[in-house]
Image (tube, rainbow, N blue to C red):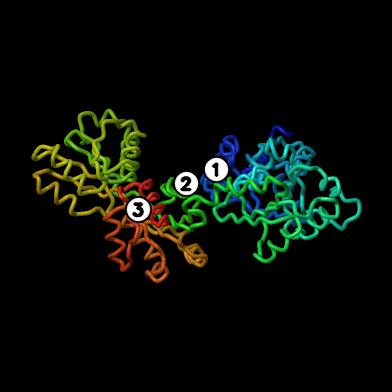
Amino acid sequence: MSETYGEVYLVGCGPGDPELITVKGMRLLKDADTIIYDRLINSRMLDFAKPNAELINVGKSSKSTKLEQEKINQIIIEKAKLGKKVVRLKGGDPFLFGRGGEESEILSKHHIPFHVVPGVTSAIAAPSYAGIPVTHRKIASSVTFVSGNEDINKKNSNINWTAISNTGGTIVVLMGRSKLNKITHELINGGINPNTPAAIIRWGSEPHQKTITGTVANISLLADKQQLLPPVALVIGDVVNLRNELNWFETLPLFGKRILVTRTRNQASKLSMLLSEQGATPIELPTIEIVPTNIKPLQERIREINEFSWIVFTSSNSVEIFFKALINLGFDTRKLFDITIAAIGNATKLSLESYGVKNVIMPKTFNTESLGNLIVKKSIVNENILLPRSQLGHDEFVTKLQSAGLQVKEIDIYKTVIPKKSKTISNEIFQDGIDIATFTSSSTVNGLVDLLGGINQLKDVNIASIGPVTQAAVEKVGLSSNILASESTVESLVEAIKAHFAK
């Protein structure tokens, strides 16, 4: 009967940083019918799921009981027997203190086909992100991984703390926060030097990572004083001293900064990725959602496209909607032969190139004023220009072209609305504080203000704008934008934010 069942993939997705999942793990995640995930999974991992995927939070922690694990096993089995492609998404590696072995045994017992996709374990990643190599040719040639979740006082313990105390290499203990004091006492009683360097790392590889260093004798006291909560990794050994010169992650320019990303869900990922690379915590709160409009009139214009000498795109959104309409009519880029294509900036140009459109003209400065000047310079009086754009397009741009004797046909092909999901999470996001709010268009400014019911929650927040038009929209609602990108690109926006904090 096994051939009628779906398959289960036990996928390790790493310790927290979403980019630490393997290529294979990501491919399976994107294709899964059902994703069963633990509570410590970075929520951004779930953004890669296909829209109709079933997401099940089983909330498993290091304190989960046998009964809780049995419930998880039952869910996995039930979904597989429905013929689903199931991804059991686990933090770190499934087979290192992750109960992946137990879940695999249950699947095997029920004759359900399964695959195991290894992941980057926090036992290595957390120290690495804290600037601590677990081995070093001159310092430690071995490493011992230990679960700190076992009851130290139970009889017939599986852990020989005396042997571990005398290994001579690095010791890494996971899931040991609640028993940290007992663990260090066992190691000292077992013979380890109390002055051996130790580090405890919370939320390893995440932008809110926190690291405390000390010795085996005092690391528990230091963790208590700073009220350090799970999840943590404890590292013991002389390799801890290397952190002084190898601490690369916590010294990134934007480390620990909570930065609000207000772009649409589809556009947010690139800005979030760039911010994460600089150590920031990107907080995604899409304040606008793109809704296509006037598709039939657009299709009519496409059928008559040879009447136009120019097509001008002022956003990636207009490119996507235009070309979907073009393709749905059975045409391709050959339909645009002999038409000059203009784009406002790099992002819009890249969107055009993804559809095979080459030789796009673009101004050196990415704004509507520069784009208008370029078109006027390169065009001929009375040429027809098609301008597919947002309902919120700027009239000044059209006026400039018309004043130069050009015939502009505007068509509003999309509008922006406030996403329903954002309304439910906006207050929760601001409760934890925001260092910077980023805006990439006037509509994101107005969308956030509408979402929050005013500007009160933004008065003490740094405001970063992608360009002068967006900055003007910020000022119009009564705020001050103290960070301005030199070019209207997300790359330039991130550089401006870095420069702000460097001051």
Q: Where does the image place residue 293, in percent across and percent down from the top left? A: 31, 50
Query: Is 113 in front, or is 127?
Result: 127
Task: Tell me the quarter of the image containing the C terminus.
Answer: bottom left
Residue drawn at x 63%, y 44% as measured from the top left: 125
Quadrant assignment, res 333: top left
The residue shown at (91%, 54%) is: 155
How far across and how far down the image is residue 101, in percent? 76, 41
Q: Residues within 10 Å of mark 1 (few under 14, many from 20)?
A: few
Residue under label 1, please give it.
19
Q: Which callout, 2 or 3, points at the residue further toward the start of the chain?
A: 2
The quarter of the rendered structure image containing the N terminus is top right
Relative height, residue 303 to residue 47 (above, below)? above
Kindly check if marks 2 and 3 are in contact, taking CB atoms under 8 A apart as contact: no
Residue placed under numbered mark 2 in the picture: 273
Q: In the image shown, does 110 or 153 lie closer to the viewer?
A: 153
> Does residue 7 appear in this view?
no
**Res. 501 in view:** yes
- 152 lies above or below 121: below
Q: CA distance from mark 3 to mark 1?
A: 24 Å
Dot 3 or dot 1, earlier in sequence: 1
Q: Name the amino acid, label 1.
A: Glu
Residue 255 in the figure: left or right of residue 385: right
Q: CA distance from mark 1 to mark 2?
A: 9 Å
Q: Secondary structure at mark 3?
A: loop
| Residue under label 3 | 440
x and y percentages locating residue 497 in the rendered image: 40, 54
- State how many labels appear: 3
Contact between marks 1 and 2 (CB within 8 A): the answer is: yes
Name the residue type under label 2.
Answer: Met
